[in-house]
Amino acid sequence: MTYILTLIANPQNPVLTASIAAEVASAVACTQKPQWLAPDIACDIAVGETQPFDVQVVLAVAQQVVAGNAIDVAIQPCAHRRKRLLIADMDSTIIGQECIDELGAAFGLKSQIADITTRAMNGEFAFEDSLLRRVALLKGLPQKALGEVFESHITLTPGAKELVATMRANGAYCALISGGFTYFTQRIAKMTGFDFNDANTLQFENGLLSGDVTQPILGRESKLAALRKIRDERDLLKEDVIAVGDGANDLAMIAEAGIGVAYHAKPQVAKMADVTIKHGDLTALLYLQGYKASELKS
């Protein structure tokens, strides 16, 4: 079976030179020239056309060649390369922040809440428990603070709009599934063009946070269930799905996808994902699917 090895740099740091690509191709015994998806940013190298090989060995060899350069490396089968379903986490993935940490900052509790967030994303304790602990600390936060946080502190990750727009333009369905809050997912989904979004719902009393969320809590297993439900409703295969996230509560959906992507992720997630993006922005997920720069939408 032919596999594709993809090298990806960040568009803001286009360090993938022709010489690096050629050196990788030689090291993995590719007889063809690298196929460029975006000059100095992304290229494909065909592997396994003439002889058997070990996927992990090829990946390790390529990573060794590019070591010291801000270049991500991925390998995957050619079949089902372009995905028909995107399942994406929101916090620290589609956006650059953790919304609950920013709410904590508005209440003077950012360091305390951020510490719990980090430990939960590292898998040190159950996401559901960590969410309840953090939301309880926010009891009494005025509802208007959510709007202030959204307007002044929440930013899209570079490439987010391009990722969603390009996949939708090519017939894919895009779902934003977050362990955060519907207040933010609804707004981010509208900004980026996601077809669907779901998250947890904060509860209020007299215009103030009550310190609780509506049950059941959307966490790791709920994200997995959402992926399966949307996939099955659309009569898709596992190989048709790409999932992306950064924390421990994303692991189940990442494992269930045809390509599970750890995006600037915690070590545990990076270790278990099919692909790890440490340097690129979210357009990396399009280059993984073989899209060329000329095909990207915004």
Image: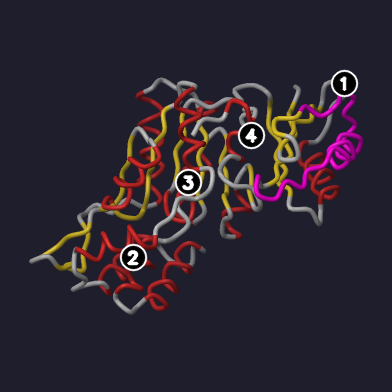
For residue 129, which numbered disc appears in the image? 2
Between 229 and 212, the residue placed more toward the observer is 212
Give the percent coordinates (x, y) of residue 134: 32, 70
Local SS, label 2 = helix
Q: Earlier in the sequence, mark 4 or mark 2?
A: 2
Q: Is residue 239 above or below residue 265?
A: above
Looking at the rendered image, the disc whose residue lies closer to the viewer, 1 or 3, is: 1
Residue drawn at the location 47% of the way across and 39% of the way down = 161
For residue 50, which numbered disc appears in the image? 1
Residue drawn at the location 21% of the way across and 69% of the way down = 211
Residue ID for mark 4: 287
Q: Earlier in the sequence, mark 1 or mark 3?
A: 1
Looking at the rendered image, the disc whose residue lies closer to the viewer, 1 or 4, is: 4
Local SS, label 4 = helix
Disc 1/disc 4 C-alpha distance (Å) = 24 Å
Q: Is residue 131 highlighted in magenta?
A: no
Q: Earlier in the sequence, mark 4 or mark 3?
A: 3
Residue ID for mark 3: 252
Disc 2/disc 3 C-alpha distance (Å) = 18 Å
Q: Earlier in the sequence, mark 2 or mark 3?
A: 2
